[in-house]
Image (cartoon, coloured by chain):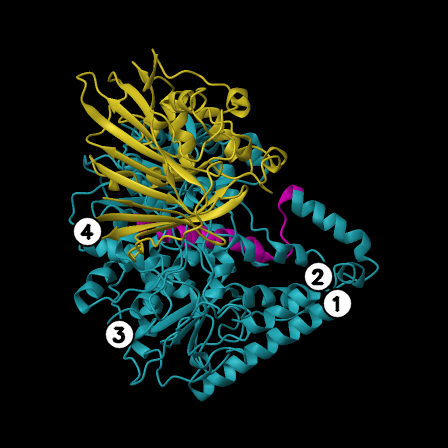
Chain colours: A cyan, B yellow
């Protein structure tokens, strides 16, 4: 058995739980991130959602999501409706990201006939981590492109001398633009980490959106990294032709990154249809939780954020989060679970212990020093004309790098040892992304077990690449060592992600999420959550039809909206536009590949 | 004396005729005479109309389609020499539609539009345009009462109490962004080329700082949003509270209310449209 059972660990709430209690700004009052948004104008299926409580039986059934095995065969089943495909996309490509959000993924879904044409191509691929199945009802082909945001723009100017950089910066920018070269290795890894997060999400999404009737056979191995892509080049071109990928997309860096064959399975799902809907709505509510009340709240934050809460992330939960990560790494690489535990390097920092406190201080200190050096070295010729926005942006990261949480995992890989295990490094990074996402989800869902009505959550997670990127800048330009070097001396580890686990009952301000959803408040380092038509297409009769853009209408439906988990103010008033509006039934019930 | 105008299909009444219609005038003790226009067949192209309003299908016909298809008859009535009021400046204030069953796209339908009399209200005079659609068997299957305010009739300045709208808990809440050309797009499929809906300059000629969206489109888009919540037969009543300027954003919300479904459009300055199914 490559995966061990994972259980969700209930977290006891404190005697007097606090809540976010966000309200609308009063007339004339200056609105800040702690107020509710005035409205939501978005085609995203997500919206501002609240967590739903799971009882023990539901938690036990939901925990099977942490050790899903790929299906071994498909059986004939009902054709998917447009509505099912939408909700599957909602849990997959449309929400499968954490705080580092960029529009670097899109999905083309093939119907049964094209899925059948795809099978012989998939069988010719090298490096598939699961067997290719016949009889898929449909197949998602996921495309990914290199990670590029204002943050990576900023990196173009790092590590240069004020005068010399006049020449080297344009050269580096050109190379980045034309050849997708990365300034630091971990920026290149972000694309692959996201593919792993996405692969995990697609696997769960197929189960939940079909009410447990379907499963996804997801492949990421054959598409990871230059070596695999070169070996599979001919087949990949044929797949690109089948999905209608045009040369402009290729030039922009889009490449096939994931294939998910989805079909009906004979095995009964332990998660029944009503629980699938509840979990679907719940997964859409999960967000990066950055604030630990009483630890890293701003001075202006309301009282609920200022008070320390007498609760801790249980040891058993931390252990299960680790187990979920190992499960996922074993699942996505195909290596034995014990080998997965050797290769997946997880440093656990228990912040509430003296050793943990000391270790956290050391990590913070190191990242602070890198930030100081970075800000000091930014070329003035670019920083001054932009109103010092670059150095301000770099300094703004300090808060995120402070790593507030009670249990922290710093994860990475020993790249030098991967070849020995027969793993392609890019494939391993993708599997690592999946592992981190599954670990985080385990903690997040645990924080919903027995959630009292007067709590927003019981545990939250923030999955971050920022501290690791900062550490990588230190390694590349300032001679620093890796965050994991001390824990694994002599193994040349490369840290890839950090996730902080927090026990608390007060969710982060909705203002943090608003950056993802509100066009007017687009965050500097994040992109908007897309509407389905922006990243999903259904391939019908040789044409890629944007999902949910039809005639003059675009999607306004919130997926799993029937569960009603929408944010309200303390009086029960909703955010205008947040609840959305169902797509017309006649379109929702259509069978796209009749 | 009732005037009756018969047409094979609703006629096309050009904009210039509406703009240049010179009524004889409205005497204080007179009223609007009975004028009726009939067409044997409801023509038009619902397939072009439906997508502009967001209707997901044309069969059964969109609930508002018969009124749009009958627009030529309504204009024929209001531009008839016996009609005593000018068309420019009239305001669509309320709308009621009743239907007994969904209308098939391929069934033969006849239509009649009738007007007679008026009521004095605070800001002017109101009159009702009645539109009635009959099926091939002569049975009335769809009817509408379009209430129009004309300031050419002196108002009495009396503010009348209106029953309060019952509160409802929204089950839908979404925002529509209306682009600047939305009025022109709707005009192209409905034939309503009233200048107040088209361009800033043409709207300014009639006293509006910005073009405003057609009331009929706002109603149609609302019904398209409600989709399968619309019963097979029933009544919808709508009040147009304030205009929706273009470009602009409005929130649509709806939810169950005693006896049916309530819906409303909220603009930046409050409600624009309030409606309910009975």
What is the distance, in whole Å, between disc 2 and disc 1 at their CAs?
A: 7 Å
Proximity of marks 2 and 3: CB atoms separated by less than 8 Å: no
Proximity of marks 2 and 1: CB atoms separated by less than 8 Å: yes
- Which chain's residue wears label 1? A
Q: Residue A452 carries which label?
A: 3
Badge 1 and badge 3 in a common chain: yes
* Label 4: how many Cα within 10 Å (few below 14, some 14–19, many 20+): some
Which residue ends up furthest to the front in the rendered image? Answer: B29
N-terminal of the two: label 4 or label 3?
4
Does the magenta stretch mainly form a helix, a strand or a loop?
helix
Residue named by callout 2: A158
Residue named by callout 4: A273
- Which chain's residue wears label 3? A
Point out the frontmost of discs 2 and 3: 3
Residue A222, position in %: x, y? 43, 42
Residue named by callout 1: A377
Between A399 and A61, the one lying in front of the other is: A399
What is the distance, in whole Å, between disc 2 and disc 3 at their CAs?
A: 48 Å
């Amino acid at each position: 058995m490559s995966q061990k059972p994972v259980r969700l660990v209930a977290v006891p709430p404190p005697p007097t739980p606090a809540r976010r209690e966000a309200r609308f700004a009063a007339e004339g009052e200056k609105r800040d991130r702690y107020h509710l948004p005035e409205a939501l104008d978005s085609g995203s299926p997500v919206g501002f959602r609240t967590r739903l409580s799971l009882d023990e039986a539901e938690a036990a059934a939901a925990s099977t999501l942490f050790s899903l095995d790929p299906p071994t065969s498909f059986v004939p089943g009902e054709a998917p409706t447009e509505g099912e495909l939408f909700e599957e996309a909602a849990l997959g490509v449309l929400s499968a990201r954490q705080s580092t959000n960029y529009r670097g993924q899109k999905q083309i879904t093939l119907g049964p006939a094209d899925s059948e044409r795809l099978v012989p191509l998939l069988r010719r691929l090298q490096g598939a981590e699961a067997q290719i199945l016949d009889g898929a009802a449909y197949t998602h082909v996921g495309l990914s492109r290199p990670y590029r945001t204002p943050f990576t723009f900023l990196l173009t100017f790092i590590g240069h001398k004020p005068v010399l950089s006049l020449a080297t910066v344009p050269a580096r920018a050109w190379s980045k633009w034309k050849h997708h070269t990365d300034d630091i290795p971990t920026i290149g890894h972000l694309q692959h980490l996201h593919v792993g997060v996405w692969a995990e999400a697609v696997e769960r999404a197929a189960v939940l959106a079909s009410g447990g009737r379907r499963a996804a056979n997801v492949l990421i191995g054959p598409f990871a990294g230059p070596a695999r892509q070169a070996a599979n080049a001919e087949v990949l071109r044929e797949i690109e032709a089948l999905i209608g990928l045009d040369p402009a997309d290729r030039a922009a860096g889009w490449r096939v990154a994931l294939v998910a064959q989805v079909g009906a399975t004979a095995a009964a799902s332990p998660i029944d249809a009503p629980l699938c809907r509840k979990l679907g709505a719940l997964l859409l509510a999960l967000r990066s939780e950055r604030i630990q009340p009483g630890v890293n709240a701003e001075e202006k934050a309301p009282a609920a954020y200022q008070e320390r809460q007498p609760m801790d992330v249980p040891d058993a939960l931390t252990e299960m989060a680790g187990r979920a990560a190992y499960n996922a790494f074993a699942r996505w690489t195909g290596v034995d679970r014990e080998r997965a535990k050797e290769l997946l390097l997880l440093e656990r920092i228990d912040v509430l212990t003296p050793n943990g406190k000391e270790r956290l201080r050391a990590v913070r200190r190191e990242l602070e020093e890198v930030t100081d050096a970075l800000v000091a070295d930014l070329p003035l010729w670019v920083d001054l004309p932009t109103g010092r926005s670059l150095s301000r942006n770099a300094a703004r990261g300090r808060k995120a790098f402070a790593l507030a949480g009670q249990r922290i995992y710093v994860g990475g890989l020993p790249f030098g040892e991967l070849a020995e295990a027969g793993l392609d490094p890019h494939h391993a990074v993708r599997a690592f992304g999946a592992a981190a996402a599954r670990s985080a989800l385990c903690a997040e869902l645990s924080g919903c077990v027995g959630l009292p009505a007067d709590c927003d959550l019981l545990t939250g997670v923030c999955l971050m690449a920022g501290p690791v990127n900062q550490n990588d800048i230190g390694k590349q330009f300032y001679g620093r060592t890796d965050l994991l070097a001390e824990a694994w001396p002599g193994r040349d580890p490369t840290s890839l992600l950090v996730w902080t686990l927090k026990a608390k009952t007060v969710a982060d301000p909705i203002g943090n999420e608003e950056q993802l959803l509100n066009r007017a408040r687009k965050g500097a380092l994040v992109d908007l959550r897309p509407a389905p038509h922006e990243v999903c297409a259904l391939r019908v009769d040789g044409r890629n039809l944007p999902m949910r853009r039809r005639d003059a209408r675009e999607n306004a439906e919130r997926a799993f909206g029937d569960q009603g988990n929408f944010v309200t103010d303390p009086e029960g008033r909703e955010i205008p536009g947040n609840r959305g509006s169902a797509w017309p039934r006649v379109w929702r019930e259509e069978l796209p590949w009749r | 004396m009732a005037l009756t105008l018969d047409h094979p299909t609703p006629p096309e009444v050009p904009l210039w005729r509406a703009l240049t219609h010179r009524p004889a005038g409205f005497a204080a003790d007179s009223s609007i005479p009975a004028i009726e226009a009939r067409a044997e067949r409801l023509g038009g192209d619902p397939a072009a109309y439906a997508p502009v309003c967001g209707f997901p299908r044309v069969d059964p016909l969109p609930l508002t389609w018969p009124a749009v298809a009958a627009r030529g008859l309504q204009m024929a009535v209001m531009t008839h020499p016996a009609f005593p009021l000018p068309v420019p400046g009239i305001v669509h204030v309320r709308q009621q539609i009743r239907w007994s069953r969904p209308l098939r796209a391929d069934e033969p339908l006849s239509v009649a539009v009738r007007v007679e009399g008026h009521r004095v209200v605070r800001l002017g005079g109101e009159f009702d345009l009645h539109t009635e659609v009959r099926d091939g068997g002569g049975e009335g299957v769809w009817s509408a009462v379009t209430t129009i305010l004309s300031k050419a009739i002196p108002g009495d300045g009396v503010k009348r109490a209106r029953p309060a709208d019952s509160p409802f808990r929204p089950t839908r809440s979404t925002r529509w962004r209306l682009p600047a050309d939305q009025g022109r797009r709707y005009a192209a499929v409905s034939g309503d080329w009233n200048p107040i809906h088209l361009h800033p300059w043409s709207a300014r000629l009639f006293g509006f700082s910005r073009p405003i969206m057609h009331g009929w489109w706002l109603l149609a888009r609302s019904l398209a949003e409600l989709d399968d919540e619309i019963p097979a037969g029933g009544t919808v009543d709508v009040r147009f509270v304030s205009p929706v300027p273009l470009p602009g954003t409005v929130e649509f919300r709806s939810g169950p209310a005693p006896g049916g479904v309530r819906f409303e459009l909220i603009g930046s300055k409050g409600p624009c449209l309030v409606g309910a199914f009975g």
